[in-house]
Amino acid sequence: MAKKALQRLLLADIGNSGIDCAVVVNDKITAFFNASLNVRFAELVEKAGETPEKLVLASVNPPVSERLLRDAAGSGIEVMVAGKDFAIPIKCGLNRPNEVGADRLLVALAAHRRFGASLVVDCGTATTFDLVSAEGVYLGGAITVGLGIAADALAKRCALLPPSISPKPNPPLIGKTTEEALSSGLLQGFAAMIDGMVQRFRQTVDFEFCPVMTGGSSALLFPLCKNIADFIPHLVLEGLFFAFRG
């Protein structure tokens, strides 16, 4: 049974590089914002604009979520954690379901609500591929390095490259400068990897699916991808909202 609508909620997706948040008013997501991993609970509430009735968390970063839970104690705001205080309503077809991160289940849930059978490419600290069937079963996927980690590794391990690498949007494939070559290798290379993985998933399963993209690096990568149907920036938060509402 769906929960009674609350007037105001704050949703928070705690990742390895930052915290993505959404404000829910009268059962609708009305705003999104970001916060750093070292944000204090009071600052998070202040960023939301008004005091929420509940803070609803999903986390793949236990030290940060545990600190926020300690900060919230005595605030009068109830904190609820996905997978602990309420279930994520998706069937899990993995051999060891306890190993899968809440974020991967939540993007699968949100994508299934939108599209049915889906392959979600989440371009965050890691790049993950998550497959969900038309029946709403999470089937697993793949995990590889994220764009930011790849850029940082190049800067750290290649002595003649710049100490900080920030790829520029829509780079030419054939770079004429070091900056263009790095942007091409990172963005065009990741886009080609994503397109190739989508094709391999299509060749492996016996059903059609909708390939969609989300996550912090998606805005840079989506324009270069040929096999991705849609870009939805805040799919984890959508899934968190669906899971909380039941």
Image: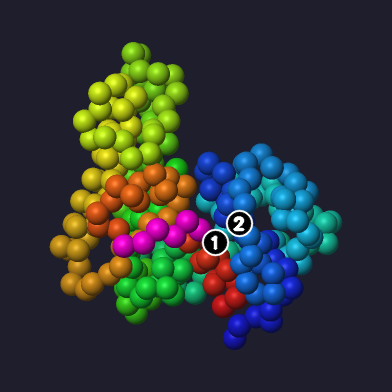
Element type where label 1 sits in the image: helix
- x and y percent of residue 102 in the render? 49, 59
Residue hosting label 1: 237
The front one of 146 and 97 is 146
Q: Residue at x 54, y 61 (%)?
A: 237
**Which quadrant does the N terminus fall into?**
bottom right
Q: Residue at x 31, y 36 (%)?
A: 171
What residue occupies the far left of the structure in this picture?
203
Tell me if I can see residue 140 in this picture.
no
- Whether residue 65 sits left or right of residue 172 in the image: it is right
| Residue 32, numbered label | 2
Q: Is residue 231 above or below residue 150?
A: below
In the rendered image, residue 233 lying in the magenta stretch gets the answer yes
Q: Which amino acid does label 1 sit on?
A: Leu
The front one of 37 and 166 is 166
- x and y percent of residue 151 in the render? 38, 31
In the rendered image, residue 246 lying in the magenta stretch gets the answer no
Question: Bounds of the magenta span?
Answer: 229-234
Of labels 1 and 2, the one closer to you: 2
- Whether residue 78 sits left or right of residue 66 in the image: it is right
- x and y percent of residue 144 in the render? 33, 45
How packed is label 1: few (under 14 Cα within 10 Å), some, or many (20 or more)?
Answer: many
Marks 1 and 2, how far apart at CA: 9 Å
Q: Splitting the image into 4 quarters, where does residue 36 fall?
A: top right
Q: Splitting the image into 4 quarters, where does residue 220 fall?
A: top left
How packed is label 2: few (under 14 Cα within 10 Å), some, or many (20 or more)?
Answer: some
Q: Splitting the image into 4 quarters, where does residue 243 fall?
A: bottom right
Q: Earlier in the sequence, mark 1 or mark 2?
A: 2
Q: Residue at x 31, y 62 (%)?
A: 229
Do callouts 1 and 2 mark residues in contact (Cβ within 8 Å)?
yes
**Which quadrant does the C terminus fall into?**
bottom right
